[in-house]
Image (cartoon, grey):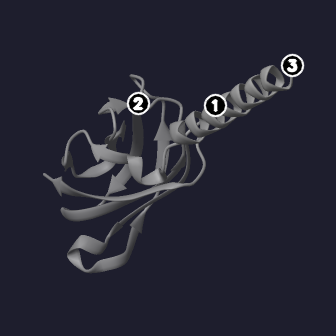
């Protein structure tokens, strides 16, 4: 009877350990995600639309419903980090894409900085993307 009880106790403990291990393994690291520009050349001017895609690098699939809480656009690539512009979120046109409207007042290099949270994951995704404003 004792051996039977010990066998069940060991099996139960093993089942708990495996479920905890698989739960922890399913959690991604923020480095498993990255934003990518859909287009790196954007028409210069007020109302320029910048579209990015959030990708899970493990699967290559787009990630929908992320919460983007930090946005900044500046001309750091051209040595003018203090040259910033207003940026506002636009509605998404497809899952995993995120769109923004900005005033790209000058031609040249612009840096888009983003901070986001993915639903169900811990940690913050932060990316800096370089784009070019063209005529």
Question: From the image, which quarter does the N terminus lie in?
Answer: top right
Q: Which percent across, then down, holds residue 66?
A: 53, 38
Q: Find residue 106 and report its image quarter.
A: bottom left
Q: How many labels does the image show?
A: 3
Q: Which percent across, then down, holds residue 25?
A: 52, 40
Name the residue: 56% across, 34% down.
22
- Residue at numbered disc 3: 1
Residue sitting farthest toward the left: 135
Name the residue: 49% across, 47% down.
88
Name the residue: 32% across, 32% down.
59
Q: Find residue 133 and report its image quarter.
A: bottom left
Judge by depth and name the residue closer to the eye, 101 or 59.
Answer: 59
Q: Are marks 1 and 2 in contact (CB under 8 Å)?
A: no
| Mark 3 surroundings within 10 Å by alpha-carbon count, few (fewer than 14), some (14 through 19), many (20 or more) | few
Mark drawn on residue 19: 1
Labels 1, 3: front one: 3
Residue sitting farthest toward the right: 1
**Separation of residues labelled 2 and 3 (CA atoms):** 56 Å
| Mark 2 surroundings within 10 Å by alpha-carbon count, few (fewer than 14), some (14 through 19), many (20 or more) | some
- Residue at numbered disc 2: 96
């Amino acid at each position: 009877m004792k051996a039977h009880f010990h066998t069940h106790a060991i099996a139960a403990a093993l089942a708990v350990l495996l479920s905890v291990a698989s739960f922890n393994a399913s959690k991604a690291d923020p480095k498993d995600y990255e934003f990518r520009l859909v287009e790196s050349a954007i028409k210069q001017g007020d109302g320029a639309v910048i579209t990015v895609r959030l990708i899970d690098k493990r699967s290559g699939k787009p990630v929908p419903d992320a919460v983007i809480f930090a946005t900044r656009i500046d001309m750091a690539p051209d040595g003018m980090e203090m040259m910033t512009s207003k940026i506002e979120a636009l509605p998404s046109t497809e899952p995993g894409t995120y769109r923004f409207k900005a005033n790209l007042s000058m031609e040249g290099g612009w840096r888009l900085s983003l901070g986001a949270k993915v639903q169900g994951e811990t940690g913050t995704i932060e990316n800096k993307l370089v784009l070019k404003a063209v005529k």
